[in-house]
Amino acid sequence: MLVASGLITAAQLGEVLELQRTSGGKLGQLLVHKKFIAERKLLEFLSKQFGIEFVDLSAAEIKPEVLKIIPENIARRYGLVAVEKTENKLKVAMEDPLNIVVLDDLKMMTGFDIKPVFGAESDINAAIDKNYGTKTAKEALDDILLKTANGTTEVSLVEEDENKGGGEDITTLDAAGEAAPIVKMVNLIISSAIKAHASDIHIEPTYKETKVRFRIDGVLHAQPSPPKKFHNALVSRLKIMSQLDISERRVPQDGRTKLKIEDKEIDLRISILPCGPGEKVVMRILDSSGLKLRLEDLGMEPENHAIFAKCIKAPHGINLITGPTGSGKSTTLYSALATLNEPDVNIVTIEDPIEYQLEGINQVGVNADVGLTFASGLRSFLRQDPDVIMVGEIRDFETMSIAINAAMTGHLVFSTLHTNDAPGAITRIGMMGVEPFLTSSTLLMVVAQRLVRGICKNCKEPYEVTPDLLVSLGVPKALLDNNIKNGKITLFRGRGCETCSQTGYKGRMGIHEILEINDQIRQLIIAKADASKIGEVAHKNGMITLRESALRKLFIGKTTVEEVIRVTGSD
């Protein structure tokens, strides 16, 4: 029926049926996971097919007395939320409104006749977080204060044997009243960050308090914080989870742990740094379920996409991705590797650390303690008959020279550098001591990228500005001409809502500057031209700068002028 309606193709159906045969799962969930159909479109289709109402929870206001009819642990376990009640009937939005067993349980539990309706899984989870979350956080903090008042000390709280923290189900522990309060609070902080789609968690001591901040869409947001007296206990718990030395508080430590939240696994990279008031903790959240591996999802302009797709499929050479930490370099690299990942291609990577496991790719983690560095690993790779090699980062002459040698002997090499723009990578390679003729003969392209926040679709609104205002902000006048109507330019912004936590932004997208190494650029490299000259010539040849890439997204309503200035202000 989906194929007949034109919502999916027969080829897509065949692919998902084969996936279902090998790995199980519901057909609809697999179609959504493969991005063959949007979740909302599928639910609207099922709603018509089964004659069951579909409710848009993102716009629904649920009364507290209705919500309380179903306990939070039941709502989370079965993926449902009560949305409306009449005298003897309760309307419940469900991921699976055909589950008769759950419907019978709800009727027995609540005493109401249950009217099931379709609700999107993401909307149900957001509704649960919005309506139950505050109460859960308060209960956890009250639990800590109560147990402390009863004589429980910090040491006894953290000396529990919790070494198997990597396999814990945080959602279950979050609701368990018997859990040790420090364990419960740590799990609450981590699970709250994951629900908020944060990329990092900062736990920072000051002389008066402990601050907790989440980095969401690249910007830090303050969160409710535990009392200062529990800071050492929180850090100790995190050390236990990542198998670090609890007694060592004088030197930095780095660890890693894996957590299970419902049916998906989350990797945490934990960095602990001793500061004046105590130890600061930063946790990087690596959620492979949110990893976008299709080139189309990288947000490149058509011109950039064409260059990128061509260079990653070259038979040999070096492709470099540049940008600061947290600019999405790993996602771009993994997307390129996923595109090349075929049964007849041998792909090997060396990373520090391995951020995401990719099926069918041989991934090696750096281990400096035993002598496994980028350079030594890359040297060994050449004896493994690879077609494609990915080096997590090129930091020195030795690694760069081996990468060049690999490219010259018929291998396709991917790696990253830390430079501010694409032409700057040429200068950086020269500073490593690499001869210009070697760079010019092996380099295929350099991609510089950043991430800008996208406007929240739920509260997006238009507004008009004068062209002169944008010119005063550094926007080239020539770029404005195609967007002027009646002397004004229409831009968009988010006014702030519950969905985006009143920020006006939801999610991030890439902006890219791609320098393709053509004959003219090769001559400049050999002549040891500086980065500004290379950039000038490349721009004349059609290279889109980071600022221009961001402005294109501004004028099509995907981001805001404030975000363009924040990310590309130096341009």
Image (cartoon, rainbow, N blue to C red):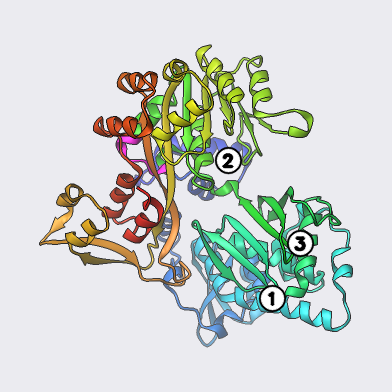
Front-most of residues 442 and 10: 442
Report the residue at 63% width, 82% height from top: 111
User: Going from the N terminus, do you reach mark 2 or mark 3 first?
Assistant: 2
Tell me the residue at 60%/56% (across/down): 200
- Tell me the residue that label 2 is attached to: 20
> Relative to residue 400, is residue 363 drawn left or right?
right
Q: Residue at x 56, y 63 (%)?
A: 196
- Circle 3 is placed at which residue position? 235
In the image, which residues are magenta? 297-304
Q: Secondary structure at mark 3?
A: helix
Main SS, magenta residues: helix
Residue 20: quarter of image: top right
Task: Tell me if residue 392 comes above or below residue 86 in the rendering.
Answer: above
| Residue assigned mark 1 | 208
**Residue 131 within the segment the image draws in magenta:** no
- Mark 1 near mark 2, Cβ–Cβ under 8 Å? no
Q: Position of residue 410 (x, y in %)?
A: 51, 13
Image spot of residue 262 (x, y percent): 67, 57
> Label 3 crowding class (10 Å Cα cut-off): few <14, some 14-19, many 20+?
many
413 to the left or right of 107: left
Which residue is at 49% across, 61% downward? 120
Report if the CB atoms under discs 2 and 3 are less than 8 Å apart: no
Question: Label 1 amino acid?
Answer: Lys
Q: Residue furthest left?
A: 486
Mark sitting earlier along the chain (1/3):
1
Q: Position of residue 571 (x, y in %)?
A: 34, 47
Between discs 1 and 2, the one toward the N terminus: 2
In this image, 477 relative to 135: left or right?
left
